[in-house]
Image: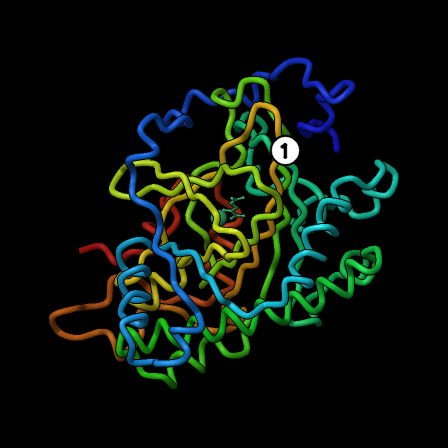
Amino acid sequence: MGSCPRDLCVDGKTVAIPERYIRHDQDPTIVVDAPSLPEIPVIDFVKLKAHEESPELERLYAACKDWGFFQLVNHGMSPSLTEAIKRGTVELFDLPKEERARYEQKVGEMEGFGRAFVVSDDQKLDWADVFYLHTLPRSLRKPHLFPELPLPYRDDLDAYSEETKKLAVELLRLMGKALGMDSREVSELFEEGMQGMRMNYYPPCPQPELVIGLSSHSDADAITILLQVNETEGLQIQKDGVWIPVRPLPGAFIINVGDIVEMVTNGIYRSINHRATVNTTRERVTVASFYSPRMEAVIGPAPSLVTADNPAQFRRITVAEHLNGYLTSELKGKAYLDSMRIQK
Ligand SMILES: O=C(O)CCC(=O)C(=O)O
Ligand SMILES: [Fe+2]
């Protein structure tokens, strides 16, 4: 893994923090008054589905508009499947070096073990190992990755990608409904979309305040479903300029609005900055499922939401152009999304 944090460990202890990981460019990672800060909203999927006109739909609307983040409880995904994904993901990062080498990121590609968003040699690095792969549609799966994953993880991941896709499509439908968006626009864009997954492994760091596990960013996709694999907390979201730690509820998914939904809803739903901090003694592992429309789909403000009083705020582009622009930029908060704005 070259210069990955894992290679800095000797007998499980990190020997020194190389300069490339030391971040003077970030807000302090320790949130001093954390107990007094608000928590992200909690949405109950059973309530949401049972009465689609219910206050729960209003709460979903407020969560997407005011927070861009919420925890989803009662989502209906089988705990045995999520437990299998957790186990398999931990095992994936524990594979011996020779085994990992098969899945190593190739030059110029983003899939496999490696890093994301490194665009220059002098850029600072995040304190993490990541494993990224395309999961759906199946035709996008790289022959040396998904089909070569160890069993039973491969089959579990196949089932998990289908289940998270279903959940993403349903949430997007309800989010559109809560907004009064034309339901055909929602289904045309999102029903047959594509999905990628990123497994994030954040090793412990003796001086966590000097580094960052994942730099501040907003997600490029439409909606992200995050599975917290172990108990270690670390996700923080930026609300009204303040970093707020997320405390995952047992069994919940953490859901966030991505840039594509901010563009399609013409800025009503917000894709907000978030980052991952690291822990002094404990590793942290998460699995992020990213869901977007297909590459050839055109994204931009939905016609049903654009009016004379509420003119289009974003340019229209294809998903392919959008993702290409995002993935070839350094992660820097919402700078990329801002470049899509129509100048007034
Ligand atoms: O690991 C986390 O808590 C956040 C992961 C994340 O934001 C991402 O993978 O985009
Ligand atoms: Fe993210």
For label 1, the residue is 283
Q: Nearer the viewer, residue 124 or 78?
A: 78
- Occupied quadrant, residue 271: bottom left
State the residue lying farthest toward the bottom: 184
Position of the C terminus, as image quadrant, is bottom left
As drawn, is 282 to the left or to the right of 29?
Answer: right
Q: Position of residue 323 (x, y in %)?
A: 50, 57
Q: How many marks?
A: 1
Q: Position of residue 254 (x, y in %)?
A: 47, 54
State the residue lying farthest toward the right: 98
Q: Nearer the viewer, residue 162 or 102?
A: 162
Check disc 1: other Cα within 10 Å, few if <14, some if 14-19, many if 20+. Answer: some
- Occupied quadrant, residue 213: top right
Position of the N terminus, as image quadrant, is top right
Q: Amino acid at mark 1?
A: Glu
Q: Residue at x 68, y 51 (%)?
A: 86
As drawn, is 71 to the left or to the right of 167?
Answer: left
- Occupied quadrant, residue 78: bottom right
As drawn, is 82 to the left or to the right of 330?
Answer: right
Q: Nearer the viewer, residue 203 or 194?
A: 203
